[in-house]
């Protein structure tokens, strides 16, 4: 049996997120549009604004996680560069 996961467009996801924000329950959205309750819940959670940055721009949960990941990567790169600088300074 092959896994045939259904792919939804960003526009479709946003429509369901907007409908949920307007008061439709996860169950109603599931019954009318098809995606599972958990799938809709994850979309809504990922799109939930968790902070406003210093420029007044909303930051969603998903964006925050991406920023954390990028921050970890940049810290690792900085650490590598610092070690390389120490090694080069010894020569």
Image (cartoon, helix red, strand yellow):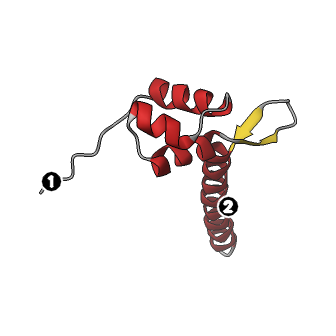
| Disc 2 residue crowd, few under 14, some 14–19, many 20+, Cα 10 Å | few
Q: Nearer the viewer, residue 56 or 75?
A: 56
Q: Which residue is mark 2?
A: 75
Q: How many marks?
A: 2
Q: Kindly identify the residue that appears in the image at 68 percent across and 75 percent down.
A: 90
Residue 83 as seen in the image, left or right of residue 14: right
Residue 67 as seen in the image, left or right of residue 31: right
Q: Which residue is mark 1?
A: 2
The N terminus: image quadrant: bottom left
Please identify the residue farthest to the right as the structure is shown.
54
> Looking at the rendering, which quadrant does residue 46 occupy?
top right
Q: Nearer the viewer, residue 56 or 73?
A: 56
Is residue 27 something one can see in this rendering?
Answer: yes
How far across and how far down the image is residue 49, in percent? Answer: 73, 40
| Disc 1 residue crowd, few under 14, some 14–19, many 20+, Cα 10 Å | few
Q: Nearer the viewer, residue 45 or 75?
A: 45
> Looking at the rendering, which quadrant does residue 6 occupy?
top left
> Looking at the rendering, which quadrant does residue 55 occupy?
top right
Please identify the residue farthest to the left as the structure is shown.
1
Q: Secondary structure at mark 2?
A: helix
Q: Kindly identify the residue that appears in the image at 47 percent across and 48 percent down.
A: 37
The C terminus: image quadrant: bottom right
How far across and how far down the image is residue 39, in percent? Answer: 46, 47
């Amino acid at each position: 049996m092959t896994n045939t996961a259904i792919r939804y467009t960003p526009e479709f996801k946003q429509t369901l997120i907007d409908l949920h924000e307007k008061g439709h329950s996860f169950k109603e959205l599931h019954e009318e549009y098809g995606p599972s309750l958990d799938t809709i819940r994850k979309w809504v959670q990922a799109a939930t604004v968790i902070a406003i940055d210093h420029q007044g721009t909303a930051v969603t949960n998903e964006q925050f996680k991406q920023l954390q990941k990028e921050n970890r990567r940049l810290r690792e790169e900085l650490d590598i560069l610092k070690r390389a600088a120490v090694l080069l300074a010894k020569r």
